[in-house]
Structures are given as C-alpha cells and as structure tokens.
Amino acid sequence: MATLAPYSDPQDLASGSAAPPPRAPGGLPGLGHLIPLLRDPLAFIESLAGVGGVARVQLGPRSVYVVTAPALVHELLVSHAHDAPRGAVQQTLRDAFGDGLLMSEGTAHRNRRRSMQSAFTKGRTAAYMPVIQEVVRERSSRWGDGRPVDVAKEMNHLALDVVTRTLFGARLDDGLAAAFHRALPDLVKGQIFHSLYPHPSFARLPLPVNRRFDEAVRVINQVVDRAVGEPAAGGDDTLLALLRSATDPATGEPLTEDDVRSEAITMFGAGTETASTTMTWLLHELVRHPDVLARVVAELDGHLGDPAGAADDVLTPETFEHLPYTRDTLRELLRLHTPNAFLMRTAARDLTLGAYRIPAGSELLFSLTALHRHSEFFPDPHTFDPDRWSADARSCGAARRAAMPFGAGKHKCVGEDLAWAEIGVVAATLLRTYRLVPVQDSAAKEVVWTTVQAQGLTVGFAPRTDPEENR
Ligand code: HEM
C-alpha cells in the first residue's frame, strides 16, 4: 500500500536507511497502471506527487520508478549523472540516427558537447537574434493580414527555419519542411511504442506504427541530408562548420559525415518541436490574458520603440535584461507548458535516491511538466500567472529552486540560450508588428506525446497600425 505522506525534504527522508519506493496506488492485475498512464499520462504522473517523491509504477510486467519531487529529479540528473544514463527511449533514436548529442553518453558525449559549445555561446546567441527576427518577418508576411492562422503549424515552420538558418546557415524549401513536420509525429509515436514494447524484437514486426516510424526515419534523414549537403550551406561560424573542423579527441581523426549528420538530426529533433510548442502556448495564453498581453507589449514598446517609430530595432540580450515582466511571462510559460513531458534514465548500478533504494537496471521516469505543476512549489499550479516570479512574490524563491525547464546536469539543454533568444525575438517581433485577433472558441488542446503539444489554436495577426493596439 502506498504511503500517502506529502513529500517534504530529501534530508528528512534520508535520515532512515534506504527503502524501496512505495508502489503507486491503484493498478489492475496484469496491466498494472497502464490504463491511467495511457488515458491521461500527465494527470496520472501529477497524481503521484503525494506518493513520497518516488513511486513504483507497474506497466504490465515492467516496473518503472516515477520521480516526482523536484529535489530528487535534480539529484538524479546532477549527483547521479554518471550512474544513471538515459534510457530505452533514447536507444530507439540511437538505432535510427546514430550517436548524436541527445543519444550519446560518457566520454563520447563530453567530447562532442565540447566541440559544439562555441555555436551556443552568449556571443553567438546575440548574433542569431537578428537572423531570427528576419525569419519571423519572412514567415509572418505570408499570414499577417488578419485572417485566422493555424498557430501550431506556423510555429513549427518558424522553429524549423530558425534552426536551419542559425545553426546550419541553410534554407529548406517548403516541400521538405512540410515533409519533416509530417514525419515528426510518426517518429515520436514510434519512439514511445518502441520504449514500451516488452522486447526490442517487437520493433521489427510489420505493425503500422513500426512502418510509419521507419518511413519517418527515412524522410528525416532525407531532410537533413539536404540541409547539410547544400553547396551554399554554412559559413565559417555555423555549427556545421564547427563539426566539420572538429576532431575526435580519442582518435585525433575528423568527425565522419555520419557523425555530422547525427548531430544535425539531433538539433532538428531537439530544437524544433520544443520551441514551436512553447511559442504556440505563448499565443494561447496571451489571447486568454489580455492584461498580460497589454503589460508585455507596453514593456516591449517602451524599450524597443513603438512599431511606427522604430520597427527595425532587434531584441538584444542587453535589452532582454531590461524587460522583467516579459521575462517573467516567458518563465511562467516554460513552467506551465514545459515541453518535455517525459524523460528517462536507467540505473547503471544500485542507487540511493533521497531515502530510496533503486536497484541496478531500474528505469526511472520523470516529467518536467508534471514537476512544474506540483502544488507544494507552485501554488495554484494550473493558473498562468507571470507575477508568481516577481521578486516580491511569496513563493518565488521555492519556485525558482524547483523549476528546471531545460533540465540539469551534464545533459542540460545545450540550446537553452538559443531557445530564450528565439522565444523572446518571436514574441517581440510578432507583438510589436501585429494585433492579435482572437478567434471565437479557439483554444489550444493539450496533446501529450514526448512533448506537450498545443493543437487546434487559430489566431489572426493583423498589422498593428495604432501603438495602443494590443496594449
Ligand atoms: C523551449 C525550448 C527548449 C526546451 C524547453 C528544451 C529542453 C531540454 C531539456 C529538458 C533537455 C534535457 C534532456 C535530458 O536531460 O534528458 C534538453 C536537452 C537538449 N536540448 Fe533542448 N530544449 C529547448 C530547445 C532547444 C534548442 C533550440 C536546441 C538546439 C537547437 C536544443 C538542443 C538540445 C540538445 C542537443 C540537448 C541534449 C543535450 C545533451 O545531452 O548534452 N534544445 N533540452
């Protein structure tokens, strides 16, 4: 029977000797907790927050440990970084795309991350900001006439353009971009099914989900080949150029073209859907909260000039520092709509996590989204409230310690600064150029795969002729 004591602090829990984590309540013979997990995965994981910080969940014959307390997720990612590598979900991608940064571990991961780091410095990020603004201008000129727009679809295109232009100095034609977006859901679905199969050989069965996964792998490889193979691709300081000039410290040899492709695929995979869902949720929340929209726009106009006066001003890292309310709004967005619904680790040896004993070979699952909806750290967690982050808010300190939308430890998001720059520039450019035109009854529906997607939102973007509009 589960202990339903609210989670407090790992120090308190650690005072006794390590014990097995409690079993999650409920579950059916043979199926365990598969039904609630498949029916509403996030609600199920959120419901485990009271089960002592780690709960053992039964998925058919497999036991998985779900970590729900922020301090224990942090401990897993930082203190156990070396003895809890990434798990089965990543293995599927490694089989399909090779050993990119998102899939590799140990020395290979460390060396590769080092060789890419200079594409993600603060200086490079600042240089990407005008490129991102150009992408937003180009894309939005196609739909910025006030008619309703499928926001998720347009943000997908925008995010793909941003990665292609900033990191690879390349452009994809619309046909390839559309093929990429069609393939991504099949890839993600296949990845999840593969990780739930009782045996890896199930991935080779002629099931529709497996066939669609294989086709998605083929399409994505084709898209990436085109992006990295374009004669005009790159410049001297793109990620692509960096990778092609890097050597493997173990062998002294340059990276192979397969290595370069694996890294390119990683960036397209890790850097597009995360950013595009975040931007879609931003528009969803701003349309629903005109008060927040008005404050953000007033702050942006105040620092960048109103659209009629200085429309060419680009957001810079320095200006961003002077936009506290806009930053709190984006921070709140990344809390409530954290894209990474599920991440996993595997215990490479017996671990002690807080007060719990986790046997070697166990799979550990955590949801950054559910973590950020934990009411002990984020009062009224389902409410979108940028003011919870203001320095004088009572819960601000606890919230700051518990929030980790970009992860923690050695696998912490390498694209974090780029993501902030992207979301900031997209918000600044769209909100200063256009008036948001809400479409009645349109709202983003939360659809959970490996990311928490925002589907079904339509909004119009009409040219903003009067500075008071949007405010
Ligand atoms: C809102 C946007 C984003 C969010 C919330 C986000 C979140 C995350 C998180 C939570 C991780 C850690 C995963 C783990 O520990 O298993 C991660 C890793 C990673 N992210 Fe992001 N990400 C975002 C955007 C980006 C962008 C724009 C890029 C690059 C173009 C990127 C590239 C990566 C890569 C390569 C990794 C693996 C890092 C490693 O293992 O060393 N991400 N991201």
Image (tube, grey):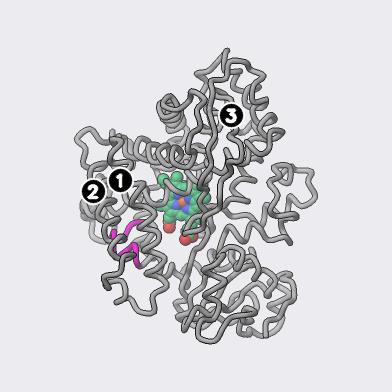
Left or right of residue 137, residue 338 in this image: right
Q: Residues within 10 Å of mark 1 (few under 14, many from 20)?
A: some
Question: Mark on residue 326?
Answer: none
Q: What element carries label 3?
A: strand
Q: What residue type is labelled 3?
A: Val
Dominant SS type (magenta):
helix
Q: Residues within 10 Å of mark 2 (few under 14, many from 20)?
A: some
Measure the alpha-carbon separation of dots 1 and 3. Answer: 29 Å
Q: Is residue 177 above or below residue 90?
A: above
Q: Nearer the viewer, mark 2 or mark 1?
A: 1
Magenta residues (range): 92-101
Name the residue that disc number 3 marks.
Answer: 437
Q: What element carries label 1?
A: helix
Q: Quadrant of residue 15?
A: bottom right
What is the quadrant of the N terminus in the image? bottom right
Percent position (x, y) of residue 266?
35, 52
Question: Mark on residue 222?
Answer: 2
Q: Earlier in the sequence, mark 3 or mark 2?
A: 2
